[in-house]
Image: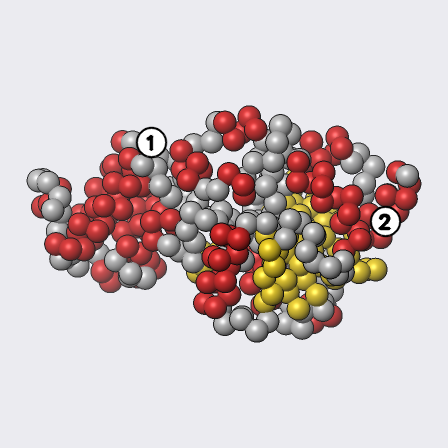
């Protein structure tokens, strides 16, 4: 049992207030779905108790059983002192109002591409029903592939990842959303095991963190799989492999939408003449780009 006076915490209000104090005192880092200590504490407490976090007032004065208190305090301790992200503690993460299963085998979902899928990638895709094939490269938990399957109802969607552990998590999410028969998951190092197939749309949130940034990551991010984050000195290791063959896997009028974080300068240093369109998201206007198959092919021919 927790020691006194912590054991005297009685209600959800009590433990939430205490959690906020501990988070502030121990300078935790945010960035896995919440913006301040209030959101972090309420999300942790409510979801540990399997309660809806948007119904806080209804449960604010509810008393915890000794077993519930012990479980909540354990998770608070892991969050504050071990710097373990809340989604890994409660085994769930939210993206575009969808709840995905997550654990340490996958990156915690936070891609800005999700915002663009909410708008069906308009105006770049005029009719969502016209899209017949979508590929999500580096699918991880499968979250973007699942969102894409909902966005483009007539599309056959494939999620590919080099990590079999990540794909095991994607399988869980595929079942959670009832897509066992509609979402294909493939273990593949980029396009290696996709048999040369072409897609109307390719989306990807690949590893793009520079080595310097990896070395300086807060402890929270060190719980995530390094394979899903790091991409060499300039963060472009994966992109150097993906871009030269990207056009080969797009249909004639296909497009690719790719997230590269803070890597625009490094990207443009490698492909200064490639015409891409930088898309505006809540993260800014230089984190995600769209490129057309036609422009990729013309650029590659010109570069030969």
Q: Is residue 157 left or right of residue 249?
A: left
Name the residue carrying label 2: 297
Q: Is residue 152 left or right of residue 294?
A: left
The image shows residue 84, relative to residue 133, as above or below, that is above
Q: CA distance from mark 2 to mark 1?
A: 49 Å
For the residue pair 248 and 121, the one nearer the viewer reads as 248
The image shows residue 213, relative to residue 12, as above or below, that is above
Q: Is residue 104 left or right of residue 214?
A: left
Mark 2: few/some/many CA within 10 Å (<14, 14-19, 20+): some
Residue drawn at the location 82% of the way across and 47% of the way down: 296
Question: Mark 2 or mark 1, which has the lower sequence index?
Answer: 1
The image shows residue 46, relative to residue 34, as above or below, that is below
SS at mark 2? helix
Mark 1: few/some/many CA within 10 Å (<14, 14-19, 20+): few
Residue drawn at the location 40% of the way across and 55% of the way down: 92
Q: Is residue 158 visible?
A: yes
Residue 137's spot in the image, x, y percent? Answer: 64, 52
Residue 187's spot in the image, x, y percent? Answer: 60, 55
What label sits on residue 27 in the rendered view? 1
Residue drawn at the location 17% of the way across and 59% of the way down: 62
Quarter of the figure with residue 200: bottom right
What label sits on residue 231 in the rendered view? none
SS at mark 1? loop
For the residue pair 227 and 8, the one nearer the viewer reads as 227
Residue 5's spot in the image, x, y percent? Answer: 9, 40
Residue drawn at the location 69% of the way across and 31% of the way down: 266
Q: Is residue 122 visible?
A: no
Disc 2 to disc 1: CB gap under 8 Å? no
């Amino acid at each position: 049992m927790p020691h006194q006076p912590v054991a005297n915490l009685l209600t959800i209000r009590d433990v939430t207030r205490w959690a906020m104090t501990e988070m502030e005192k121990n300078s935790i880092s945010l960035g896995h779905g919440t913006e301040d200590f209030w959101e972090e504490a309420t999300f942790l407490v409510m979801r540990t108790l399997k309660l809806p976090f948007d119904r806080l007032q209804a449960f604010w004065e509810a008393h915890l059983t000794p077993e519930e208190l012990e479980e909540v305090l354990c998770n608070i301790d892991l969050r504050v002192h071990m710097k373990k992200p809340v989604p890994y503690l409660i085994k769930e993460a939210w993206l575009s109002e969808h709840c995905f299963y997550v654990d340490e085998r996958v990156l915690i979902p936070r891609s800005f591409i999700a915002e663009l899928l909410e708008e069906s990638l308009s105006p770049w895709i005029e009719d969502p029903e016209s899209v017949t094939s979508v590929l999500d490269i580096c699918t991880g938990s499968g979250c973007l592939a699942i969102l894409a399957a909902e966005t483009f109802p007539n599309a056959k969607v494939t999620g590919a990842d080099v990590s079999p552990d990540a794909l095991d998590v994607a399988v869980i999410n595929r079942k959670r959303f009832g897509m066992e028969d509609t979402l294909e998951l493939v273990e593949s190092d980029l396009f290696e095991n996709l048999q040369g197939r072409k897609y109307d749309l390719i989306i990807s949130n690949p590893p793009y963190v520079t080595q310097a940034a990896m070395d300086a990551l807060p402890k929270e991010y060190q719980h995530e799989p390094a394979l899903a984050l790091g991409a060499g000195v300039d963060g472009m290791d994966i992109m150097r492999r993906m871009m030269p063959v990207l056009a080969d896997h797009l249909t004639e009028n296909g497009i690719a939408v790719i997230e590269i974080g803070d890597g625009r300068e490094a990207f443009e240093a490698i492909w200064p003449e490639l015409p891409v369109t930088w898309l505006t998201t809540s993260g800014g206007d230089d984190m995600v780009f769209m490129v057309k198959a036609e422009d990729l092919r013309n650029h590659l021919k010109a570069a030969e």
